[in-house]
Image (spheres, rainbow, N blue to C red):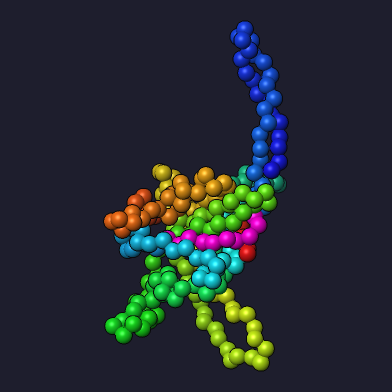
Amino acid sequence: RKRKTIPTLGNASNGDYVLIMTETVKTSSTLIGFEKVYVGIYNNNGDLQEILEWKDDHGGTVNMKIAGLDADELRVRASNKFVWISKKGTGDVKVEFETFNPPYEDMMTILGRTKDQHNIHWAGEDTNPPYVSLLAVSSNLVGEKAYLGLPKGKLGVNDTEFATTEAKQKEPKNTKLSGTFVDKVIEGKSRVFGSCFGEDKFDKFKELIIGTVDSKSSKAVGSSLSSTSSSTGSQSVSR
């Protein structure tokens, strides 16, 4: 962490103002590693149905890139020069990430593949992936836990690839998912991406990004999805 000394005003015992030097600690923003990802699944009413946790050899996280966090510039030119600029909001927020051996049923749910009476999953004209939320877990340079969240979007897999075995065994390929995320109203504000550092913030951050499921009643709490309109930078983590 980087430390910085900041002068502030305080009150002396006689009522006079005195200058106090206080030291603040700045958090490292550089991300190292990609531990796991939580995926929230929602029904057609926007209610949280389940929370998936992908890590290790069951959906182990390899890398993730979040793009479109920076808004497009709007500029006005007058008197032979630019005199006004605006960069309010975000761009089109998109996600790409790779995972190792994600559970089949999890993938079918995320992709909206329906299962018939023969336990066969299908993709077709009725395929409609559910809304999902993502919460990625990483760390920064000084070892603090880092959390990055996207509260509302849809994921997909554009292709399926396989090939014959080779004489020399190779490592299996990762599954590549991509998707687009939009704004969700969180505590009265339109939000599309959030991040924080420190394990003490995890529970609240997870509640705001994904919601919670009551294990006794299986009822979702604090997880309703509300739509608003959203207005290119990027954030990425890797294994």
The image shows residue 61, relative to residue 69, as above or below, that is below
How would you classify the magenta stretch by its main secondary structure? strand
**63 or 192: nearer the eye?**
63
Is 33 a magenta residue? yes
Q: What's the magenta region?
A: 31-40
Which one is nearer the viewer's eye here, 233 or 131?
131
Q: Is residue 88 above or below residue 138?
A: above
Q: Quadrant of residue 41?
A: bottom left
> Relative to 228, is 176 above or below?
below
Say whether residue 130 is left or right of residue 219: right
Viewer-proximal residue, 74 or 88? Answer: 88
Give x and y (percent) for residue 159.
52, 80
- Classify residue 66 by image quadrant: bottom right
Return the residue found at the far top: 14
Considering the image in quadrants, where does the N terminus appear?
A: top right
Q: Which quadrant: the C terminus?
A: bottom right
Q: Residue at point 62% right, 7% down?
A: 14
Q: Is residue 35 inside the magenta stretch?
A: yes
Task: Answer whether residue 11 is visible to the viewer in this image.
Answer: yes
Q: Residue at x 46, y 73 (%)?
A: 103
Residue 71 visible, this orientation? no
